[in-house]
Amino acid sequence: MDVQAQIECLNAALRLQHRSVLMYSVTAGSVIGLEYQAHADKMRRHAAAELEDATRLVEKITALGGIPTTDVAEIEFKEDPAHALDQLVDCEGETLEALQAAIEPTGREAASEAVEHRLEHMIMRKQEQVDYLLRARRRP
C-alpha cells in the first residue's frame, strides 16, 4: 500500500464526505412542499449514513498515521427543493469519483484489501442514495 497516497486520497474523499453530511442535513430540514416533505425523513437517514462513513474515513486516515482533514467542500443552499436534489446528485457524483479514486493506492495486502472493501461498501451505499434521488426527480 502506498500509505501517503492512500492518506491523500482518503482526505480528498473526506472533504467531500463532510459536504455530503451537511447537504443531506440541510436539505432534509429545509425542503418545502408536500411532494418534497415525503423525502425529508429519508434524507435525514442519508445524513446519518454519511456521518457514519465520514467517521470511518477519519478512523482509517488516523490508523494510517495521517491527519484527517476538517475542510469541507463548498456547499450552497438551494431554496428550491428540485434544485437541492439536482445539487445533491451532482455533488454525490463527485464524491463517488473520489471514493473510487481512493481504491487505486490500496495495494494487495490484507490491510489494503480491507480498505478497498470498505470503500466499495461506501460507494455502493452512496450510489443507492443517488439512485433514490434520481427517482425522486423524475416525473411520470
Image: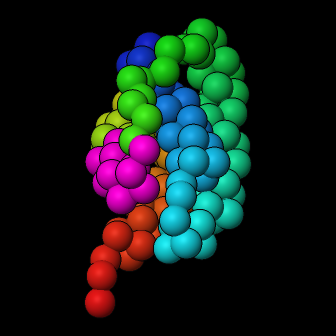
x then y, percent, for residue 83: 33, 52
Residue 1 image-quadrant placement: top left
Q: Would you say residue 82 sits in the magenta stretch?
A: yes
For the question of whether residue 3 can be seen, the reply is no
x then y, percent, for residue 41: 67, 63
| Magenta-tinted stretch | 79-91
Q: Would you say residue 86 sits in the magenta stretch?
A: yes
| Circle count | 0
Q: Quadrant of the C terminus?
A: bottom left
Residue in the picture at 63% in, 48% down: 29
Prevailing secondary structure class for the magenta stretch in the rendered image: helix
Q: In front here: 123 or 66?
A: 123
Residue in the picture at 69% in, 28% down: 59
For the question of whether residue 126 can be seen, the reply is yes
Vertical placement of residue 78 versus 83, above or below? above
Tell which residue pokes out farthest to the bottom in this image. 140
Residue 26 image-quadrant placement: top right
Image-based side of 89 in relation to 62, left or right: left
Residue 73 image-quadrant placement: top left
Colour approach in the figure: rainbow
Q: In front here: 112 or 132?
A: 132
Vertical placement of residue 99 versus 136, above or below? above
x then y, percent, for residue 138: 31, 77
Q: In front here: 122 or 113?
A: 122
x then y, percent, for residue 24: 55, 47
Image-based side of 43 in relation to 131, left or right: right
Residue in the picture at 42% in, 65% down: 133
Residue in the picture at 34% in, 70% down: 137
Q: In front here: 95 or 101?
A: 95
